[in-house]
Amino acid sequence: MMKRLFISIALCALSWGAWAVDMQAHMGTREAREAYSQYLEKQTAYYTDTYSPDALRALSGDDLFGALNTLMGSTCRIAETRFSYNNLRSQYKYVDKDLNQSGYIIGYYDGCSMNGTWDSGSTWNREHTWPQSKGADKSIPMGYDMQSVRPASTAVNSDRGNTPYGESSSYYDPNVVSINNALYVSTNLGSYRGDAARVVLYDYIVYGQAGSYKSSLYNGNAQLLGKLGKSGVFESIPVLLKWHMTDPVSLTEMVRNDGAANYQGNRNPFIDYPELAIQMLKNVSGVTTYTVSTTGATLWPAYALTLKDGFIAYLGTPDNRPTEVTVTGATGKYDKESGRLTITNVTGAVSITAVGAEALEQTADGKRAIKTIHNGQVIIIKNGKAYTTLGTIVGDLR
């Protein structure tokens, strides 16, 4: 064990300049958004018309599954013959990029920063979130889908095997693996529980079936609701949703979501809009939900439902955090500096009331602009038009 620790530390050693970022920081934080804002424009271009965020949020259950399944089927190119399991090895350095060091990648489960050049598995290997033995064989698209198969340090990869995810005994919990990165900030609450849950959800909507909805990529072994328990891929749907909602999307996930989309065409919607997961699975047996309402500030993710376990979300924007927050129907803990709201012990309908003036900023021409969140994206409103943080016009409000 001591030898493995020394090797792991050596493999994860890196140098960085004056600028550095915790790759496990949640996308609701200033740190993550300032380090990587490119995703906003890419989200806007991908989710359009009947697949716009508002259109998707208006759906639930099988109908939401169907919309996402159709979107994935029409944009995912993974079934083309030019893609393969071996191709992944040379592409991770473009997908799982460590923003702190060119040519390095972030490892699954432990956040280790590793040289992205393939060395025949000595440093890292490919981890199937949905195990090969349970339907994601490396010879078929599901087994070499970039959104699903992630690089992990060789030692960490071998520890899990094909054990299903969960919290009870005989299950695999990523939280047993310590984050092994010198830039990790523990107060950022980085974890890989949510990552695993979002990948499993992704595999289900791409390769599975709900009702009459299935695409040409259908794989009969990707039926999530039939893959629960000790012989499946996850302990239960409530545990999956709990992990997803209490471990928000990280900078690592958003960077690789963009990279994977560049590689094979499709995004993971549960990374882009986490609130869709509970909307889709709310009618599953064993899932009990409570409504969530928010006034006085925008909520990211834009949860309208929660489990009894609650969730972690962010209020306002980095430049416009509420000064006070009141929560009823649950226990709420608010950190004004980061904007992080932690909801636990849900007993009924959750009401979140935020107090704080809308942030107004001076623009270069001396006029006033409002920065806010719309459909999960940071939007700047000026002169009746809405812009992304990169200056792209995304709407005319006049």
Image: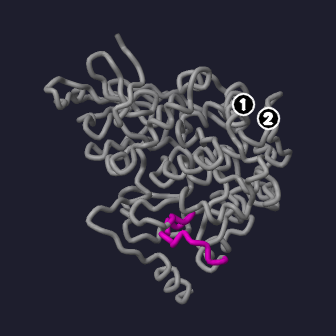
Q: CA distance from mark 2 to mark 1?
A: 7 Å
* Residue lying at 66% horizontally and 44% vertically, measured from the top left: 202
- Can you say whether 55 is above or below 86 in the image? above
The answer to whether 204 appears left or right of 178 in the picture is: right
* Residue lying at 38% horizontally and 56% vertically, measured from the top left: 188
The residue most toward the front is: 82
Residue 97, position as x, y percentages in the image: 49, 60
What is the quadrant of the N terminus in the image? bottom right
Name the foreground residue: 365 vs 157.
Answer: 365
Please tell me whether mark 1 sits on a helix, a strand or a loop. Answer: helix
- Can you say whether 4 is above or below 210 in the image? below
The residue most toward the left is: 366
Q: Main secondary structure of the magenta part?
A: loop
Q: Mark 1 = which residue?
A: 70
Residue 396, position as x, y percentages in the image: 38, 16
Name the foreground residue: 351 vs 365.
Answer: 365
What is the quadrant of the C terminus in the image? top left
Residue 182, position as x, y percentages in the image: 38, 71
The answer to whether 362 appears left or right of 289 in the picture is: left
Query: What is the total number of numbered labels drawn onto the structure image?
Result: 2
Tell whether label 1 touches label 2 (CB within 8 Å). Answer: yes
Inspect the image, locate mark 2, and give the three-letter code of the amino acid beneath it.
Ser
Q: Mark 2 = which residue?
A: 215
> Magenta span covers which residues?
105-120
* Residue lying at 54% horizontally and 34% vertically, measured from the top left: 275
* Residue lying at 63% horizontally and 34% vertically, measured from the top left: 288
Q: Is residue 379 magenta?
A: no
